[in-house]
Structure formats: structure tokens, C-alpha cells
Image: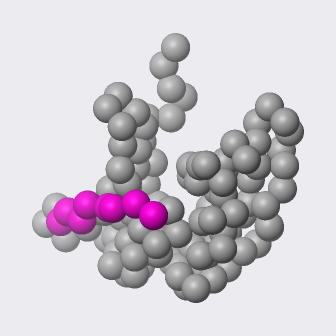
Amino acid sequence: MTNSLNWFEIPAIDINRAEKFYAQILSVKMQLMDFGGLKMSTFPMDSGGVSGALCQGAPYKPSQDGALIYLNANPDLSVALSKVEEAGGKVLMPKKQISEEYGFMALIIDSEGNRIALHSNK
């Protein structure tokens, strides 16, 4: 079966600040690219997996409205969640269990003002 999600883009006002925020809370290395004024910093991806990028430039504008993206914070989102405020974000909803089958989630506001969900199995 194919994935429902192929790619995602998270708006950033300051791409360097946003990259530092996500690299810190998710403990990942991101890759910054410039496409003639459109700056993107990509999240890591396993071969054949789904990924996305932070994007700075027109028409990207951070928002707390609209679609909600769940980022992988496995193995335990408590680790990522504990880094959110120190990295310049805000915890909107602390870790809570969705169900035994679907694991746990939390809601945050990132360094750019976007509402983002974090998810893990435990």
C-alpha cells in the first residue's frame, strides 16, 4: 500500500532558527538548501520513506490553523517534548495516550509559530 502522505512543508520565518529548533528537539541532522531565494531545510528520510522540509520564502507563512502534521518522536516523545521550551517553542498539550494501539501524542508551537504534533509508540 502506498503512503497517504508523500511530502510536507513547514513554513519558517527564520530558516536557521527553525532548523536549530527541530534538530534539537528531534535529535536529527537537517540539510539546508537554497533554490534562488526559496530556502528549504529537509528532514532525514529512510530509503523509500516519507519526509518534508522547513521552507522560508513566498508563499510560506507560519500558522496555527489548518492541517496538523504529526512528526515522529520515537521511541518516546517525552524526550523531544522536554526540549521544546528550551529550543524556543511552547507545549500546547502535554503527552497523552491516543490508545494502546496508536501510542502517544502531544501538541507544540514551534519556534516559528506553527502548531505541530509529536507522536511516538511509547
Q: Is residue 63 magenta?
A: no
Q: Is residue 32 magenta?
A: yes
Residue that appears at 35% across and 28% down: 48
Quarter of the image holding residue 39?
Answer: bottom left
Residue that appears at 42% across and 68% down: 23
Quarter of the image holding residue 16?
Answer: bottom left
Looking at the image, which is closer to me, 57 or 33? 33
Q: How is the image coloured?
A: one colour
Looking at the image, which is closer to me, 18 or 38? 18
Q: Position of residue 120 (x, y in %)?
A: 66, 48
Using the image, determine if residue 16 lies above or below residue 23: below
Q: Position of residue 5 (x, y in %)?
A: 50, 35
Using the image, determine if residue 58 lies above or below residue 90: above
Q: How many marks?
A: 0
Residue 73 relative to residue 12: left or right: right
Q: Is residue 85 visible?
A: yes
Residue 55 relative to residue 21: left or right: left
Q: Position of residue 26 (x, y in %)?
A: 50, 62
Residue that appears at 74% across and 53% down: 105
Using the image, determine if residue 68 lies above or below residue 5: below
Residue that appears at 35% across and 50% down: 44
Q: Is residue 70 visible?
A: no
Residue 94 relative to residue 121: left or right: right
The magenta segment: 27-34
Q: Position of residue 54 (x, y in %)?
A: 39, 63
Quarter of the image holding residue 32?
Answer: bottom left
Can you name the residue that lies furthest to the left here?
36
